[in-house]
């Protein structure tokens, strides 16, 4: 069936604006969708069981309520407005509006009188929330439903749920006002004085399709192309949880209030004094907050706009609301006054070009689409300016009843409304898959602190505006910095290992395959190496490169360098020769410790004196086994480790002895490593994690177990090896940890701590 429209509904353009002629009574029942309806239909079609796009009206009715009269009033309102009798079947594969005849409305009543009184309120909110989320069938309708919760004979809650495709927030106010008028008239035995709506929404959809094209559309699109063209910076806020690949839209609401004094300052000191509206001021403040949170100076915020640009539309029920993207430039750390001027320009420009439907704008700009993200922005800001609706029913007191749908369309949606005492009522709807309530509460507090600071001094630059409360400042500057803990700040790391050798010389220090190196032997061989290195000129602050396979000789080499007073520079033998050459040249080490099997992997012409830990062992055996005088102190360089170079040239990071001693003390406190523990050395020597594995264990007197290479690179084999060797504390790089956790292998029986690092862990061990 071909799509038909009301051929007599036409737009007459002239100097007086746009007049939309009403349709004849015998108009065909099928019409095109408006642009906004098209987008909502598409989104709902992608997730037909999702109750995300609902308008929910909740009112508390205390007193004697005539349920039959209320049901009659609801039916009369549905009869007055075609949008409430519309469904959206497919016609030739495309959705159309199909308007049905008026039908009776059934007001379902749910009696909660049997629920214990102390739980009744909570149960009412639970039932209302479930009703708000229950999906509609767009193709068959109806797209509205009503539920009356009876808490007792004099206490009811009306929950009216409409699909957003047939109504918006403005429509909700109209509908409730008409219900009140019809109810009151029937109770009082008179005829309701309601004027027939001048138009129906389908007429507006037809007009919009005809009017918004050609030169008018192109003129408005040109503005948005200029404003939003190029790359709109993605707002990356710090979240409590990683963003899921598929959005769950699990939402929650946080209500807060801006007091009358601060609200007055926003209206006068900022808005009125600078020729701005309150919304412009709130936009400037919110953008400044988001910039501080994200570190970005390019902030795009979505905002709903009523979309009822003609007087004929004000009494029509339907989806008029449009969304505009407000892109604000915060570069250069402007003053708040300067930012407010920028926000004013942004809002005025958007208002002047608001007729472009958001759906048409997205199609024009073609941003990168991602189901987990909104196409142009992730946060919303609104200031409610809907016509005030004061509901009065004879014999009944009417109150708002907030229904929490438990959904969220955006990461954050901040809405303000005027409060009764001159303050502002704020509501933050947030995505629970991203944020915890405490985080959102802090954000709301920080926004108020920032606005308060701006009111006090609008000439202050954004970076100087206060975010933190006095309590938070005290926590950050004092309490969180009260982290001092006792550690051997005046001792060198090799001295702490030597103490263990004196205390437990026969205890195993390093185990690698068939080789077991006791603490006593480790100490003696490291001493001999240290004497040899001192003979080669090694002293405090002298760097010694070491390129060796993981195992006993590597540990001897590291400890020997420290005992000589030098600083070791670990080189991973698996790294390319070009990278090794770069690090050798950069660190300017006069001596290089290695193994004979690795000589061919080393770059030519490095200029360092080469000592082979295996080949030259007999030479070093003639050195004294006594502890040499290292000359090193707590602020002497202990080692230099190089960054990965993923963002450029690898850079050497210099670590002093006191830093290593502090790390060791923290590690031992946190993980309670002791002489009875068996730990691992898995990380490549060129990574800083190797120092985390070795030094705490050796200072604690634990035994360090080194898996062979073929075991190290097989996640399942390594996991089993931990159990076979009785490992109690193990460190695994994050990718390796994820593989063993995903393997399904049972955890090693005596493993009490699995440590990981280097990246975010996406899996968790089974409890």
Image (tube, helix red, strand yellow):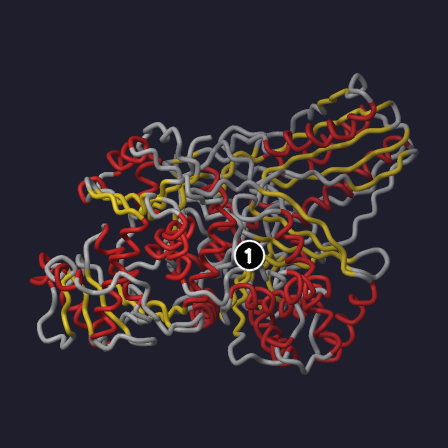
Residue drawn 38% across and 45% down? 702
Residue 8 appears in the picture as rendered: no
Q: Is residue 336 above or below residue 236?
A: below
Residue drawn 69% across and 26% down? 105
Task: Give the x, y percent position of residue 528.
Answer: 24, 63
Q: Is residue 520 above or below residue 186?
A: below
Residue drawn 49% across and 51% down? 35
Depth check, front residue: 318 or 735: 735
Task: Give the x, y percent position of residue 713.
Answer: 22, 43
Identify the residue at the far top of this view.
114
Q: Is residue 730 left or right of residue 79?
A: left
Depth check, front residue: 549 or 740: 549
Depth check, front residue: 186 or 685: 685
Q: Is residue 446 left or right of residue 193?
A: left
Residue 117 appears in the picture as rendered: yes
Task: Give the x, y percent position of residue 724.
Answer: 29, 31
Task: Give the x, y percent position of residue 714.
Answer: 22, 39
Depth check, front residue: 470 or 601: 601
Q: Is residue 519 left or right of residue 480?
A: left
Dot 1: within a 10 Å radius of its alpha carbon, few (fewer than 14), some, or many (20 or more) residues?
Answer: many
Which residue is tagged 1? Answer: 379
The local secondary structure at tag 1 comes to: strand
Q: Quadrant of residue 150?
A: top right
Q: Is residue 87 above or below residue 583?
A: above
Identify the residue at the far left of this view.
600
Residue drawn 22% across and 64% down? 546
Q: Count the marks.
A: 1
């Amino acid at each position: 069936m071909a799509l038909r429209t009301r051929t007599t509904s036409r737009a007459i353009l002239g100097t007086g604006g746009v007049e939309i002629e009403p349709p004849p009574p015998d108009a065909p029942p099928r019409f095109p969708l408006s642009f906004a309806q098209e987008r909502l239909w598409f989104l709902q079609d992608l997730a037909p069981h999702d109750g995300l796009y609902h308008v929910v009206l909740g009112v508390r009715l205390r007193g004697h309520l005539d349920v039959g009269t209320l049901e009659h009033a609801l039916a009369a309102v549905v009869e007055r407005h075609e949008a409430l009798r519309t469904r959206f079947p497919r016609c030739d594969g495309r959705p159309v509006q199909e308007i049905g005849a008026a039908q009776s409305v059934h007001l379902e009543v749910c009696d909660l009188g049997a629920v214990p009184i102390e739980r009744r309120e909570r149960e009412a909110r639970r039932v209302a929330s479930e009703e708000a989320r229950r999906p509609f069938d767009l193709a068959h309708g109806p797209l509205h439903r009503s539920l009356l919760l009876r808490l007792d004979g004099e206490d009811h809650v009306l929950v009216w749920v409409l699909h957003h495709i047939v109504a918006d927030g403005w429509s909700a106010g109209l509908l409730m006002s008409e219900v009140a008028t019809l109810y009151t008239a029937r109770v009082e035995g008179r005829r309701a004085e309601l004027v027939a709506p001048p138009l129906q929404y389908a007429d507006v959809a037809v007009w919009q399709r005809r009017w918004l094209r050609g030169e008018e559309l192109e003129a408005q699109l040109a503005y948005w192309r200029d404003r939003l063209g190029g790359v709109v910076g993605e707002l990356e806020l710090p979240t409590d949880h990683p963003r899921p690949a598929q959005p769950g839209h699990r939402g929650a609401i946080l209500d807060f209030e801006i007091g009358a004094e601060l609200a007055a300052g926003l209206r006068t000191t900022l808005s009125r004094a600078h020729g701005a509206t309150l919304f412009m001021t709130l936009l400037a403040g919110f953008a400044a907050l988001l910039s501080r949170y994200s570190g970005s100076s390019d902030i795009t915020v979505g905002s709903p706009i009523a979309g009822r640009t003609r007087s004929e539309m004000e009494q029509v029920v339907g989806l008029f609301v449009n969304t505009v993207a407000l892109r604000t430039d915060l570069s250069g750390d402007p003053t708040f006054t300067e930012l407010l001027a920028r926000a004013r320009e942004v809002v005025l420009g958007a208002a002047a070009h608001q007729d472009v439907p958001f759906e048409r704008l997205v199609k024009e700009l073609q941003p990168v689409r991602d189901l987990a993200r909104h196409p142009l922005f992730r946060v919303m800001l609104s200031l409610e300016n809907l016509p005030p609706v004061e509901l009065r029913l004879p014999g009944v007191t009417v109150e708002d009843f907030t229904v929490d749908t438990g959904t969220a369309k955006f990461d954050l949606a901040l809405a303000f409304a005027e409060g009764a005492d001159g303050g502002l009522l704020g509501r933050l709807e947030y995505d629970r898959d991203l944020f915890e309530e405490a985080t959102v509460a802090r954000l709301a507090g920080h926004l108020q602190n920032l606005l308060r600071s701006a009111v006090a001094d609008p000439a202050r630059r954004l970076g100087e505006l206060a975010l933190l409360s006095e309590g938070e400042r005290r926590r950050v500057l004092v309490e969180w910095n009260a982290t001092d803990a006792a550690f051997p700040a005046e001792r060198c790391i090799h001295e702490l290992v030597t103490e263990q050798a004196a205390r437990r010389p026969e205890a195993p220090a390093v185990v690698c395959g068939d080789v077991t190196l006791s603490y006593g032997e480790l100490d003696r061989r490291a001493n001999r190496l240290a004497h040899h290195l001192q003979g080669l000129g090694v002293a405090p602050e002298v760097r010694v490169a070491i390129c060796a396979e993981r195992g006993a000789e590597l540990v001897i080499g590291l400890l020997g360098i420290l005992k000589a007073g030098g600083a070791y520079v670990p080189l991973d033998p698996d790294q390319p020769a070009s990278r090794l050459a770069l690090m050798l040249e950069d660190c300017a080490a006069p001596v290089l410790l290695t193994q004979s099997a690795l000589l061919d992997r080393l770059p030519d012409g490095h200029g360092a004196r080469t000592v082979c830990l295996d080949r030259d062992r007999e030479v070093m055996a003639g050195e004294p086994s006594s502890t040499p005088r290292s000359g090193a102190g707590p602020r002497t360089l202990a080692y230099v480790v190089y960054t990965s170079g993923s963002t450029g040239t690898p850079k050497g990071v210099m670590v002093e002895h006191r830093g290593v001693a502090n790390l060791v003390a923290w590690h031992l406190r946190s993980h309670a490593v002791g002489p009875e523990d068996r730990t691992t050395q898995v990380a490549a020597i060129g990574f800083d994690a190797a120092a985390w594995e070795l030094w705490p264990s050796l200072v604690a007197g634990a035994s360090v177990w080194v898996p062979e290479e073929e075991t190290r690179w097989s996640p399942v084999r390594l996991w089993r090896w931990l159990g076979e060797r009785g490992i109690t504390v193990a460190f695994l790089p994050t990718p390796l940890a994820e593989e063993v956790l995903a393997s399904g292998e049972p955890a090693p029986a005596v493993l009490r701590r699995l440590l990981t690092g280097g990246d975010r862990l996406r899996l968790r061990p089974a409890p």
